[in-house]
Image (cartoon, helix red, strand yellow):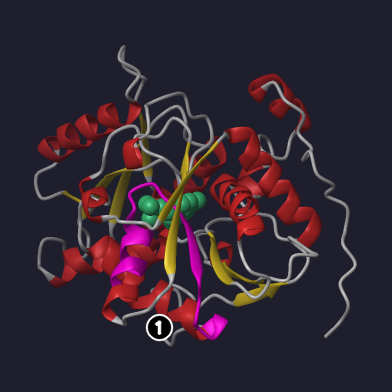
Amino acid sequence: MLHSSGTLTPFVTPTVKLSRLFAPHAAHIYAKLDLLQLSGSTKERTARGLIEDLLDSGRLHTGGMIVESTSGNLGIALARQCVVRGLRFTAVVDENANPLALNLMRVYGATVELVATPADGNKLAARRRRVQDLLAEHPGSVTTNQYGSPANPRAHFASTMPEIMAGSGGDLDYLFIATSTTGTLLGCQQYIRAHGLDTKIVAVDSVGSVLFGGASGTRRLPGLGAGVLPELAAAAQPDLVFQIEEIEMVHGCRLLARREGILAGASTGAIVAAMGKLLPDLDSGARIAFMVHDTGVPYLPTVYDDDWVRATLGADPEPGFTADPVEVPHP
Ligand SMILES: Cc1ncc(COP(=O)(O)O)c(C=O)c1O
């Protein structure tokens, strides 16, 4: 289903019920398929919200320039949104960025600036410094500030969570969201509070991320986690937090692909791993929703490549549990 304004607004993506992923556990599990956005991720919503906020407040005009630090998905979404809005875009990226994501940004006409990893190893801080330099070099240019702009969570308050409610039938016990800026989580949290819902929010973060008190460490897979606390994170109050290892993300991704035929990125694999940890403690009738944050296609050379997994993560790429297809009776 499309909004009437075609490619300007994000798609209303389907929310589908999964019956195989954790069978025979009988929890009701709903997947929000944001991998079907035109730019391939939830960041399509964030990008639209951030840009419209700048346009509405008069800080950005048609023909203007946006500069943003991005590990990939926001850059792709901003690049695409800039095409259909007549804007220019420079993405500031680091070595963690997926080369395929950078190619996609370039396809949409973006300029891509690669920032080298500084001596202290803090890639995010280095990217943010470069954004400030570029803004100074290009008078009139603006940054969308995905890390601090209230327009980021507002986009998810206004679209992501209402769509999950409509698509799942609501009455959710748990909602699993991967975290980076925490914008998606915050928007859903605001919705849950505004509507007095009992839904518990589960934040899914990466080992090596400083969000939620974690210790900074090496993170190779993009999409989730942060090396520096984003401003938005101060307001994020999840009911549960899971910090997931990269090999668990790989196993989660592969399980989702093999059991449900959904090819997702690393952060969704982390969510699947986190659900697998919580599920044994839940009643069989538990109602759960989770975000499929992005498509797994750009992760074919990493998450889904056996040699990369063995060489980089030093572990068996296949899940310890069986990933064979599961027979599920038709309703
Ligand atoms: C792959 C991926 N993981 C996780 C997230 C959640 O990120 P944030 O906390 O910045 O909203 C997104 C958002 O679009 C995403 O694209």
Residue at horizontal 15 percent and vertical 49 percent from the top = 141
Judged left or right of residue 170, residue 89 is left
Q: Check disc 1 and give the amino acid type.
A: Ser
Residue at horizontal 54 percent and vertical 64 percent from the top = 290
Residue at horizontal 41 percent and vertical 50 percent from the top = 179
| Span highlighted in magenta in the image | 167-190
For the C terminus, the image quarter is bottom right
Judged left or right of residue 308, residue 168 is left
- Residue 85 in view here: no
| Residue in front for this viewpoint, 176 or 16 | 176
Give x and y (percent) for residue 94: 40, 30
User: Is residue 42 found inside the magenta-colored segment of the image?
Assistant: no
User: Is residue 175 found inside the magenta-colored segment of the image?
Assistant: yes
| Residue in front for this viewpoint, 140 or 54 | 54
| Dot 1 beta carbon under 8 Å from ligand 1 | no
Residue at horizontal 55 percent and vertical 69 percent from the top = 289
Give x and y (percent) for residue 276: 65, 52
- Residue 162 in view here: yes
Judged left or right of residue 141, residue 187 is right
Give x and y (percent) for residue 34: 53, 65
Q: Using the image, determine if residue 263 lies above or below residue 283.
A: above
Which residue lies under the disc numbered 1?
5
Q: Secondary structure at mark 1?
A: loop
Give x and y (percent) for residue 19: 75, 71
Judged left or right of residue 36, residue 57 is left
For the N terminus, the image quarter is bottom right
